[in-house]
C-alpha cells in the first residue's frame, strides 16, 4: 500500500443537518460555573475599575474550579484543569497570593491549577505568541484558560473597533484550538452608567461578538468592604446582582447575599441645556469622546442617547464643531 493511500482521507467540512445532529451529544455539556456563568468552551469577561478586586476574585474562581468546590458564591459542578496566564505580578509574589488563599481549602486544587510562568511578553495577535499560549494550554491539558489582564496580551488600540475585532478573533482562535473555556479580565471605560454591564468594557462593540457572559465588579460604597457583581449572559437570563465581601486575612470573597435589584430609573430626554452644561463643565473646547462621556455622567444616559444629543445640538446650532473640537456657539 502506498504512503498516500495509507493516509486517512480528510474529514469533510461541509455537513448536512442530519450529519451534524448525529455528532451532537445526547445532552448539552454542563456549564463549568453555574448557573450559566461559564459554558464549556465559553468566554467570560470579568471587568471593573482599577483596584476593585478583579484579580483576587478570578484567582478565587480559578482555585474553586481546580478544586471542584463551591466557593465565593459560585457553584462548581466538577474539578477542572485551569491554566492561569497573569501578567501583573512577579511569579513569586503571585504564588504567595495563591498560597495564602490555599490555606482555606487545603491541597484540593494543587494538581489541577497550573501557572504559565513565561506568559509575560507574548501577544495573542502574533503567531509566536499564539503558539506559546497554545503550547502552554496543551502542556496543562487546560479546560479553562485565565488571561489577566487582556491589555497585556495585545498591542492593539482599544478605542479602534477594527483593532479590537482582530484581537477578538485571536481569542476565538485560542478557544477553538485549545478547546478550553476562557476567563478574560478586562478594564472598563472611564465613564459608565449605573446599569451598564457588557457595554461598560473597553472595545465593547467588538467584545459583544465573542463573549458568552460578562461579570462586572463595582464598589457600591467606598466606606463598605463589599463589591457588587452584575451579570449579563448571551444565552440565558442574567442572575440578579450579588454582593461579596473580601476577607483580607484569607484573600477570599464570600457572598453576603443579593444586592437590591431595583429597576433602572426611567431616563429623561437629554436637553440642549444638558449638552451646554456638560461642555461648560470640562472646558471651552473639547473632543467628541470627552463631551459624550461628560453628558453620560451628568444625565446618566446611554452612550447612544449622548451621541444623539450632540448631533441635535450641532443641528440646532447651540454648539459648534470645528477641527474635531466642540464649543458653545457665540
Image (spheres, rainbow, N blue to C red):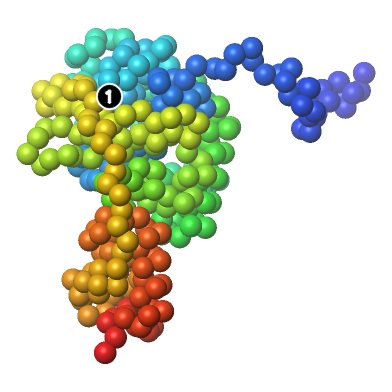
**112 or 215, which is in the foreground?**
215
Q: Position of residue 9 (x, y in %)?
A: 83, 25
Which part of the image, by quadrant, shows the C terminus?
Answer: bottom left
Q: Residue at x 22, y 30 (%)?
A: 259
**276 or 248, which is in the foreground?**
276
Q: Position of residue 51 (x, y in %)?
A: 20, 42
Total marks in image = 1
Which part of the image, by quadrant, shows the N terminus?
Answer: top right
Q: Residues within 10 Å of mark 1 (few under 14, many from 20)?
A: many
302 with respect to 282 (left or right): right
Q: Residue at x 32, y 20 (%)?
A: 74
Return the residue found at the far left.
223
Return the residue found at the far right.
1
Residue 213 visible in image: yes
Q: Residue at x 37, y 60 (%)?
A: 305
**104 or 78, which is in the foreground?**
78
Q: Position of residue 230 (x, y in %)?
A: 31, 35
Q: Residue at x 10, y 23 (%)?
A: 249
Return the residue found at the far bottom.
330
Residue bearing mark 1: 60
Q: Position of residue 79 (x, y in %)?
A: 40, 13
164 with respect to 272 (left or right): right
Residue 85 visible in image: no
As drawn, 320 above or below 179: below
**Secondary structure type for disc 1:** helix
Amino acid at each position: 500500500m502506498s504512503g498516500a493511500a495509507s493516509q486517512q482521507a480528510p474529514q469533510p467540512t461541509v455537513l448536512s443537518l442530519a450529519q451534524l445532529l448525529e455528532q451532537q451529544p445526547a445532552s448539552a455539556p454542563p456549564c463549568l460555573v453555574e448557573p450559566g456563568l461559564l459554558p464549556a468552551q465559553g468566554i467570560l469577561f470579568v471587568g471593573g475599575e482599577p483596584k476593585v478586586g478583579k484579580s483576587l476574585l478570578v484567582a478565587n474562581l480559578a482555585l474553586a474550579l481546580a478544586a471542584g468546590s463551591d466557593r465565593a458564591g459560585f457553584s462548581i459542578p466538577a474539578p477542572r484543569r485551569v491554566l492561569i496566564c497573569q501578567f501583573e505580578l512577579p511569579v513569586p509574589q503571585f504564588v504567595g497570593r495563591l498560597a495564602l488563599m490555599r490555606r482555606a481549602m487545603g491541597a484540593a486544587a494543587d494538581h489541577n491549577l497550573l501557572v504559565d510562568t513565561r506568559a509575560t511578553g507574548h501577544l495573542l495577535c502574533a503567531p509566536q505568541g499564539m503558539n506559546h499560549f497554545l503550547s502552554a494550554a496543551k502542556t496543562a491539558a487546560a479546560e479553562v484558560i485565565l488571561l489577566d489582564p487582556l491589555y497585556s496580551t495585545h498591542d492593539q488600540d482599544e478605542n479602534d473597533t477594527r483593532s479590537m475585532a482582530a484581537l477578538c478573533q485571536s481569542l476565538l482562535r485560542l478557544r477553538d484550538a485549545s478547546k478550553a473555556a476562557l476567563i478574560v479580565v478586562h478594564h472598563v471605560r472611564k465613564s459608565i452608567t449605573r446599569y451598564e454591564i457588557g457595554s461598560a468594557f473597553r472595545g465593547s462593540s467588538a467584545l459583544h461578538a465573542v463573549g458568552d457572559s460578562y461579570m462586572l465588579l463595582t464598589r457600591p460604597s467606598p466606606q463598605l468592604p463589599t463589591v457588587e457583581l452584575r451579570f449579563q449572559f448571551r444565552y440565558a437570563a442574567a442572575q440578579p446582582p450579588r454582593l461579596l465581601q473580601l476577607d483580607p486575612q484569607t484573600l477570599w470573597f464570600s457572598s453576603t447575599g443579593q444586592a437590591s435589584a431595583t429597576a433602572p430609573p426611567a431616563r429623561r430626554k437629554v436637553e440642549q441645556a444638558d449638552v451646554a452644561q456638560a461642555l461648560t463643565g470640562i472646558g471651552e473646547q473639547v473632543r467628541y469622546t470627552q463631551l459624550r462621556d461628560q453628558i453620560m455622567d451628568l444625565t446618566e444616559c446611554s452612550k447612544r442617547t449622548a451621541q444623539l444629543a450632540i448631533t441635535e445640538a450641532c443641528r440646532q446650532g447651540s454648539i459648534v464643531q470645528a477641527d474635531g473640537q466642540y464649543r458653545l456657539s457665540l
